[in-house]
Amino acid sequence: MAYTAVITGATKGIGRAITQLFASKGFHLAITARTEKDLQSLAAELRKTYPTIEVIAKTTDLSERAQLTAFMELVNNSWPQVDVLINNAGIFLQGELLNEAESHLDQMMQVNLHAPYHLCRGFIPKMQAAGKGHVFNICSVASKKVFPGSGAYATTKFALLGFTKALRQELLASPIKVTAVLPGATWTASWEGATIPEERLMPPSDIAQAIWDVWQLSPRTVVEELVLRPQAGDL
Ligand SMILES: NC(=O)c1ccc[n+]([C@@H]2O[C@H](COP(=O)([O-])OP(=O)(O)OC[C@H]3O[C@@H](n4cnc5c(N)ncnc54)[C@H](OP(=O)(O)O)[C@@H]3O)[C@@H](O)[C@H]2O)c1
């Protein structure tokens, strides 16, 4: 069987670039996002361009536990192995901790931290049984530095980096690799409406390429943290 990858938030931005690159390399893909139309049109495009790959596309709101579990069960029942899990889906709600809607932190925690936690618990046992696997958690430069107007987001991304480090520590004695990816400003839908020129930000294809390069290293080496920034630095 070809290699398999599970990619969340596959329809836009960084997730879409990763999906397209892994599809072009012949991976079978399990992809998810909330918007049915976007997900099915991406799945159709992938099946047409890469007729040999299998695409599992299931609309899922990862903040809903029952939906997340249904997606996981579908993948686990369809495939004997999961080689790569890319926890990419994430949301950013601007605000200040003391003034924003109280729900901000919970909403972002569910997608940015709880979903990767549950997906890791659902897929890593399969990797352990196969004796191989690689988890990429898409954190952020905001996992290490707090930017103005993003206190709750930074809280969730610091937590995701902490979770990733703890997972790496627990899997040290196993062949399963764990990589925290920390991108800086990347040109995606999240930046729509901003007055900054596209050229100032990183293209999502560069994040995808870096993940691919890390995946290709020998079983003897893991990249624990991959930090990427625009050439001119943070915004
Ligand atoms: N862009 C940046 O500058 C930047 C910088 C650092 C880190 N990051 C991180 O990189 C990741 C991707 O960012 P991006 O800018 O590419 O995001 P994006 O363009 O906003 O795309 C987000 C993707 O996640 C899906 N998604 C959102 N909420 C979801 C949910 N509850 N359940 C399932 N899918 C959901 C979206 O589809 P639907 O809306 O249809 O659900 C979409 O496919 C995020 O974790 C983000 O925090 C981004």
Image (spheres, rainbow, N blue to C red):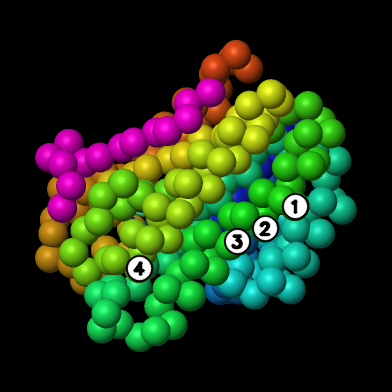
Residue 181: quadrant of the picture: top left
Query: In the image shown, does 229 or 14 lie closer to the viewer?
Result: 229
Asked if labels 1 and 3 touch by Cβ distance under 8 angstroms, the answer is: no
Asked if labels 3 and 2 touch by Cβ distance under 8 angstroms, the answer is: yes
> Residue 170: horizontal and vertical position, in percent?
65, 35
| Rendered image: mark on residue 115 | 3
Q: What separation in Å lies between label 3 and label 1 (alpha carbons)?
A: 10 Å
Q: Earlier in the sequence, mark 4 or mark 1?
A: 1
* Mark 2: C-beta under 8 Å from nearest atom of ligand 1: no
Residue 128: quadrant of the picture: top right
| Rendered image: mark on residue 184 | none
In this orientation, does residue 11 appear? no
- Tell me the amino acid under the disc marked 4: Ala
Of badges 4 and 1, the one in the foreground is 4
Reply above or below: 195 against 211.
Answer: below
Query: In the image shown, does 70 or 37 lie closer to the viewer?
Result: 70
Q: What separation in Å lies between label 2 and label 3 (alpha carbons)?
A: 5 Å
Q: Report the residue marked by disc 2.
A: 118
- In the structure shown, which secondary structural element does the residue marked by tag 4 occupy? helix
| Rendered image: mark on residue 122 | 1
Instruction: Look at the image and give the residue range highlighted in magenta.
Output: 222-235
